[in-house]
Amino acid sequence: ELDPLGITYADLHSKYSDRQGNPHQIVLRQHMLPDEADMDRSFKLPSTTFIGGKEKALPLREILRRLENTYCRHIGVEFMFINSLEQCNWIRQKLETPGCMEMDTNQKRLILARITRATGFEAFLARKWSSEKRFGLEGTEILIPAMKQVIDKSTELGVESIVMGMPHRGRLNVLS
């Protein structure tokens, strides 16, 4: 096998879908949770977590499911190096609150349209000025829809002007 660690797989969950669960679940169940009945036992949630929403206790199965949905998917956030407990809790609340990452179909289509427009414009620039040195969007395609969302939300909240630093990557795409 050319990629024994599976680094090139974009979706690790589908890679292990034909097996008996992913390796982390297998290790957890074999070594840490000897009895399946423990999975249905309810545990009181500590005040340091927001995975329960308004619930104060959840079955272990649900706790693990919610933690996996928050921390074992495609989006990751590194915040434990922050010294401010208040800032860490704010980030944790934004990530762990149930349903916070769910989007309706229209939002997903809007993001897809914005990514398509950005990559299409990038392809046009590459064809039109193929011999010129330019800093394209390669690897930062989501930058354009993310910036557009920040601008849209800011105007909804009453922000009148936005000042931002300009990176090299995607400069023409950002300006358009």
Image: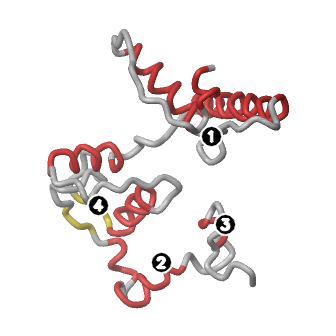
Mark 3 neighbour class, 10 Å CA radius: few under 14, some 14 to 19, many 20 or more: few
Q: Residue 15, how many percent across, how many down?
A: 66, 70
> Which residue, given by chain and number where applicable, does mark 3 sit on?
9
Q: Does the residue at mark 1 contact the one at mark 2 (Cβ under 8 Å)?
A: no
Which of the two discs, 3 and 2, sits closer to the camera? 3
> Which residue, given by chain and number where applicable, does mark 1 sit on?
141
Occupied quadrant, residue 40? bottom left
Choose the circle earlier in sequence order: 3 or 2. 3
Mark 4 neighbour class, 10 Å CA radius: few under 14, some 14 to 19, many 20 or more: some
Question: On residue 69, which mark appears?
Answer: none
Between residue 11 and residue 135, name the one nearer to us: 135
Q: Does the residue at mark 4 contact the one at mark 1 (Cβ under 8 Å)?
A: no
Check disc 4 and give the amino acid type: Leu
Question: On residue 25, which mark appears?
Answer: 2
Horizontally, is 69 left or right of 47 in the view?
A: right
Q: Secondary structure at mark 3?
A: loop
Give how far apart the Cα atoms at labels 4 and 3 are: 33 Å
Which of the two discs, 1 and 2, sits closer to the camera? 1
Choose the circle earlier in sequence order: 1 or 2. 2
Check disc 2 and give the amino acid type: Gln
Q: Residue 176, how many percent across, how many down?
A: 63, 20
Residue found at x 39% / y 68% = 61
Give how far apart the Cα atoms at labels 4 and 1 are: 38 Å
